[in-house]
């Protein structure tokens, strides 16, 4: 339990959570602006949106690893999370690109999936939040959101 004070507060986790939240806000703002300029400007916004999304998902993965080492993530869900988080990151990047061309609901993927995952990581790490929801529904929600957000843009593009 490194980077904790004598009272046990997880400073390192909290700092990374704040950084991930800031990256989320920057990514969301950038991704939302991918249709507000000329072609070159929109292309730059897509590129920066994807860069911010990748950085944000790396921070989320670190948070989930830290929460796992604390013991807040039950064993059966670890395998799903290890597979779905990288796929959700790829899906978010693809969705930003699709949104820049087609508009519509595609922006929901890079906005909803990381937000739910950030909340889940905080839930898994802070014992006070674990009292608000049992592990089974919390794990089911995050796995369902990650699974749907991973598949949805690819299915929509193929239609």
Image (tube, grey):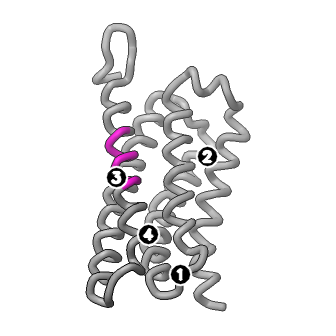
Question: Which of the two discs, 1 and 3, sits closer to the camera?
Answer: 1
Instruction: Name the residue beneath numbered marker 2.
Output: 77
Is residue 34 toward the left or the right of residue 85 in the image? left
Element type where label 3 sits in the image: helix
Question: Which of the two discs, 4 and 2, sits closer to the camera?
Answer: 4
Q: From the image, which quarter does the N terminus lie in?
A: top left
Instruction: Name the residue beneath numbered marker 3.
Output: 23
Q: Residue at x 39, y 53 (%)?
A: 25
Q: How far apart are the alpha carbons under marks 1 and 3?
A: 22 Å
Q: How far apart are the alpha carbons under marks 1 and 4?
A: 10 Å
First reached walking from the N terminus: tag 4 or tag 3: 3
- Marks 1 and 3 in Cβ contact (< 8 Å): no
Q: Check the image and report above or below for 104 versus 26.
A: below
Instruction: Name the residue beneath numbered marker 4.
Output: 32
Q: How far apart are the alpha carbons under marks 4 and 2?
A: 32 Å
Instruction: Name the residue beneath numbered marker 1.
Output: 103
Magenta: main secondary structure equals: helix
Place of residue 14 in the rendered image (x, y in percent of width and height, measured from the top left) = 37, 31
Question: Which of the two discs, 4 and 3, sits closer to the camera?
Answer: 4
Density class for disc 1 (Cα within 10 Å; few <14, some 14-19, many ≥20) is: some
Question: Which of the two discs, 1 and 2, sits closer to the camera?
Answer: 1
Q: Tell me where the magenta segment starts and ends, as one range.
A: 18-25
Place of residue 122 in the rendered image (x, y in percent of width and height, measured from the top left) = 50, 35
First reached walking from the N terminus: tag 1 or tag 2: 2
Place of residue 71 in the rendered image (x, y in percent of width and height, measured from the top left) = 52, 29
Q: Residue at x 31, y 83 (%)?
A: 43
């Amino acid at each position: 339990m490194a980077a904790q004070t004598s009272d046990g507060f997880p400073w390192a986790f909290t700092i990374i959570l704040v950084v991930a939240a800031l990256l989320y806000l920057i990514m969301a703002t950038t991704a939302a602006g991918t249709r507000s300029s000329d072609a070159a400007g929109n292309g730059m916004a897509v590129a920066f949106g994807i860069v911010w999304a990748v950085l944000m998902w790396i921070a989320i993965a670190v948070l989930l690893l830290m929460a796992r080492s604390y013991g807040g993530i039950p064993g059966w869900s670890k395998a799903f999370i290890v597979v779905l988080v990288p796929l959700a990151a790829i899906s978010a990047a693809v969705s930003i690109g699709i949104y820049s061309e087609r508009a519509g609901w595609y922006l929901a993927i890079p906005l909803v999936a990381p937000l739910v995952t950030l909340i889940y990581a905080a839930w898994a790490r802070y014992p006070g939040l674990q009292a608000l929801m049992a592990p089974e529904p919390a794990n089911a929600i995050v796995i369902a959101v990650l699974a749907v957000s991973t598949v949805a843009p690819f299915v929509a593009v193929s239609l």
